[in-house]
Image: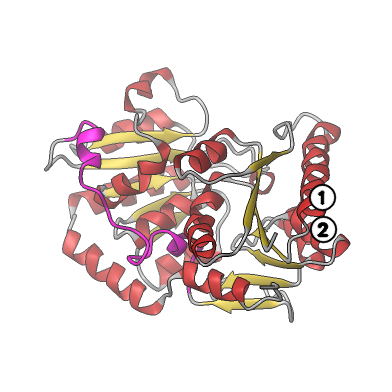
Amino acid sequence: MDILIGIGHPAHVHFYRNTIEELRSRGYEVGVVTKKRDLAVELLDAYDIEYTVAGNSNIQKDSLLRMALPFLHLEIDVLREVRKNQPAVVTGIGNIPLSHASTIFDCQSKIFVDTEHAHLANNLTFPFADQIFTPECYQDDLGPKQIRYPGYHELAYLHPNQFDPDPTILNEAGLDEDERFVILRLVDWNAAHDIGDGGFDNVVDVVESLEQTGVRVFITAEGDVPEAVEHCQLAIEPHRIHHLMYYADLFIGESATMATESAVLGTPGVFVSSSRRGYTDELEERYDMVFNFSGKERQSKGIQKAISILNDYDQKLWDQKREELLEDKIDTTQFIIKQITTSRIPK
């Protein structure tokens, strides 16, 4: 095998899917190994990408042992996959097992990362990686292995070269053509880098405050939502979400990834989380497209900002800001492909 790609999160499927298609079209043999996450597998199936599942359980936070066992299962399965396929290059987003496997089985590891506060995962990955690729706005200096590029992970699949919005999504979501709506994202805080973090205090209050502006609120959540707002849950296929985000008036939520996705699509984002990211900070400070709220009053301040945006909404303004962003940034998929294909892959 030429290249083995590791998937640890549903967003990683989006990040690599265009790269996988392009590399295979060029004649490279590309394998995919994914952590056992339902949505990741669902997305791989939706995009017709063949894969192998590694690991057999989710993280349990009630004891150190129950937290460690899923990592151990995943590590063993990935090591077996690398040994079996003997790829020349392995790549993933902050992928611990693949970085370890690259050292053990002498293949190049190209690791992408954009989350500074994922300290445990980063400390277990970086010493074993050959190259570490980060956006220019990444706040940490990782030494000689680090290669910075002018882009975001989200531009691997939402750059205009890679994405065309489909207006039929409005009908799929049950929306009238001129109906205003907001996407609200809730996370389950089960990722290793989310431990100890939080977002909204009261989801019902968030929904009611937004609805008072006259918009419709769609909730997309990793876990259950309160009964009072169950009627807001979004019922479209997961791989179609970005089309809906393009047409939304606003994104508000606990996901840095989705806040950034919205921004690069020209939809303003309100990111409510106790943790911050270099890329969401840049999107606020440089492009005025994402607004970050991380303090104790993050919910109330986030709602205030969201209402302010909705009350003074000007799509031409957001389109202009998006164009300024795109002028500065690259098509991340083309960058990924270049880094992989300049490796020592025998042809």
Q: Which residues are magenta?
A: 151-175
Tell me, for residue 100, which label it has, or none.
Answer: 2
Crowd tier of the residue under label 2, counting other residues whose Cα lies within 10 Å: few below 14, some 14–19, many 20 or above: many
Quarter of the rendering occupied by the C terminus: bottom right
Could you tell whether 243 is left or right of 121 in the image?
left
Asked whether the residues under the numbered discs 1 and 2 touch, taking CB atoms below 8 Å apart as contact, a structural biologist would say yes
Residue pointed to by mark 1: 79
Instruction: Report x, y in % for residue 167.
Output: 20, 47
Is residue 13 at least partly visible in the picture? yes
Instruction: Report x, y in % for residue 41.
Output: 56, 38
Please tell me in which quadrant of the rendered image residue 87 appears: bottom right
Q: Amino acid at mark 1?
A: Leu
Q: Label 1, secondary structure: give it.
A: helix
227 or 41: nearer the viewer:
41
Residue 215 magenta: no
Instruction: Report x, y in % for residue 43.
Output: 49, 41
Crowd tier of the residue under label 1, counting other residues whose Cα lies within 10 Å: few below 14, some 14–19, many 20 or above: some
Q: Residue at x 41, y 35 (%)?
A: 220
Q: Label 2, secondary structure: give it.
A: helix
